[in-house]
Amino acid sequence: MTNPTRFETDQLRRLEDMRKTFDKLRAERIRAEGEVERLTRELEEARALALSEFGTDDEGQLQGLIEDAQARNAKLADEFATALRDVESRLKQLGDER
């Protein structure tokens, strides 16, 4: 058997480097595919939950429900603050009457 030439040795080294890169990319692809499968399952579970809880899995409708709930919460917080001020005012009046 003859000794490999410098060109052949360089080509073998280059092929080995490319094989390592290929193996690394293949492993990354497999991980990415697994991640896509996991995220797809999570999305489907979230959609099913939204559908059962809110009657829809449409993002726009869900965003509208969230905005409505935030507006209701803000209104209720304002009403509660007003009620607290009224109670505080009445207590102050009672204290002043003594």
Image (cartoon, helix red, strand yellow):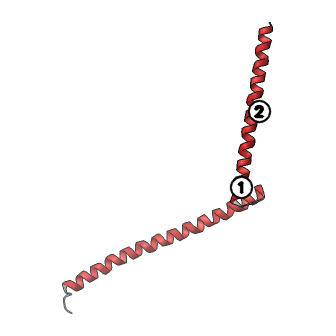
In this view, 98 is above or below 84: above
Judge the density around disc 2: few (<14), some (14-19), many (≥20) Cα neighbours within 10 Å. Answer: few
Q: Quadrant of residue 38?
A: bottom right
Q: Residue at x 59, y 69 (%)?
A: 37
SS at badge 2: helix
Amino acid type, residue under disc 1 in the picture: Leu
Q: Residue 69: x, y in percent?
A: 73, 46
The residue nearer to you, when weighing 80 against 33, is 80
User: Residue placed farthest to the bottom in the image?
Assistant: 1
Mark 1 and mark 2 lie on one chain; the one further toward the N terminus is 1
Q: Quadrant of the N terminus?
A: bottom left
Residue to which mark 2 is pinned:
79
Q: Residue at x 29, y 79 (%)?
A: 14
SS at badge 1: helix
Q: Quadrant of residue 18?
A: bottom left
Residue to which mark 1 is pinned:
62
Q: For marks 1 and 2, give the CA distance.
A: 26 Å
The residue nearer to you, when weighing 28 against 97, is 97
In this view, 2 is above or below 6: below
In this view, 19 is above or below 58: below
Q: Residue at x 71, y 61 (%)?
A: 58
Q: Residue 89: x, y in percent?
A: 76, 19
Q: Is residue 51 left or right of residue 17?
A: right
Amino acid type, residue under disc 2 in the picture: Glu
